[in-house]
Image: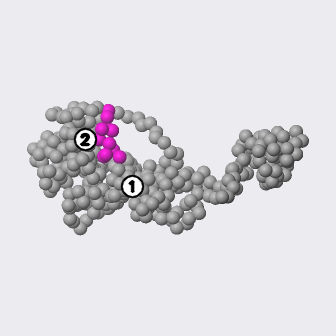
Amino acid sequence: MGQAYTHFSLEERCAIAQRRAAGASIRQIAAALDRTPSSIARELKRNSGTKVGYKPSYAHDQAKARRWRGSKLLRNADLQALVLERLRRGWSPQQVAGRLAREHGRVVVSHETIYRFIAAQIARTKNYAWRLYLPRGKSKRGFRGRKGGSAAEHIKNRSPIALRPTAAADRAAPGHWEADLMLFRTYGQAVLALHERSSRALAIVRQPNKQAGPVADAITALLASLPSTLRQTITFDNGTEFAYHDRLRQSLGLQTFFCDPHAPWQKGGIENAIGRLRRVLPRKTDLATLTPNQIRHIARIYNHTPRKCLDFQTPAEVFLKALHFECDSTFPLSRE
């Protein structure tokens, strides 16, 4: 059996410096620390500065610097190129890492390694364009507080989310939807987003405005072609753009429910989806420059992105598998 070696700790380096300054010999220091004389001699030789001599903190930093071989993504150019290519598609580091693990049957790179690689590039180059590889485009990790409150709650015949069936809450069965409206800097521009809770599949369509009538008509058009078992409930926030929800009950037999005031997190699926869409459709986007095909393409990209909550399958894969859907396009709800 081979002999086990351990690196010097910072405390041991402090003891070496103190005893060396007191005039102790290498053998005396080795005996006090229960180390071999050759280890002490090598430590003093390798980690002493030409001007400062042997200082514990300097020696510790020098030893750590020699052991660091660089990030895994810096050492593996092919892996780095593959990871960056998938990040450009809008995938998060966790989605990239999870999908690679699913494809190779083992962990290839962790999401933490990817985050640290991006952070290191920003710190080293001072080029904040690296942050654009991340889903939220932030140069610093962590959540930030958001200002603002919920919309007015003056909607007739609204049913609170507490009355929503349990099957909708646990995501066990398909047919339960969430909806929200994405607004943009140019007045009157909006995109309606529908999110299926079980598969996380998404459909988006541009709206002429945020009036309740066109919004109800758009939801009807998107869901009318589905069998009744696949359009059971839909959940909104308290925005007045959903004031005509009764139309959906009458035309589609769809049960409608509303979040509690100031609690949009209760429809967390669509909130998360819109957060992801904001990377390709930021608030400053001029929708007049986008064609319907381009908007449908954005939905396809979303539905082809693997999700951790789906065991790194894509929403399209889960939607088609669960519902036995056979079609040529990525997601039937993206059609107009």
Magenta run includes residue 264: yes
Label 1 belongs to which residue? 280
Instruction: Work out whether residue 158 can be spotted.
Output: yes
Q: Is residue 33 left or right of residue 247?
A: right
Of the residues under marks 1 and 2, which one precedes in the sequence?
Answer: 2
Residue, far front:
1
Which residue, given by chain and number where applicable, does mark 2 sit on?
A: 169
Q: Give x and y (percent) for residue 83.
A: 48, 61
Numbered label attached to residue 45: none
Quadrant assignment for the N terminus: bottom right
Q: Position of residue 120 (x, y in %)?
A: 58, 53
Q: Is residue 128 visible?
A: no
- Which residues, given as a range, are shown in magenta? 262-272
Q: Residue at x 48, y 65 (%)?
A: 82
Q: How many marks?
A: 2
Q: Secondary structure at mark 2?
A: helix
Disc 1 to disc 2, C-alpha distance? 29 Å
Disc 1 vs disc 2: Cβ atoms closer than 8 Å?
no
Q: Nearer the viewer, residue 315 or 85?
A: 315
**Outermost residue, right direction?**
23
Q: Nearer the viewer, residue 165 or 296?
A: 165
Residue at x-position 37% and y-position 47%: 275
- Could you say which is closer to the camera, residue 113 or residue 147? 113
Disc 1 marks a residue whose amino acid type is: Val
Q: Write down the quadrant of residue 18 in the picture.
A: top right
Q: Secondary structure at mark 1?
A: loop
What is the chief secondary structure element of the magenta stretch? Answer: helix
- The residue shown at (58%, 61%) is 74
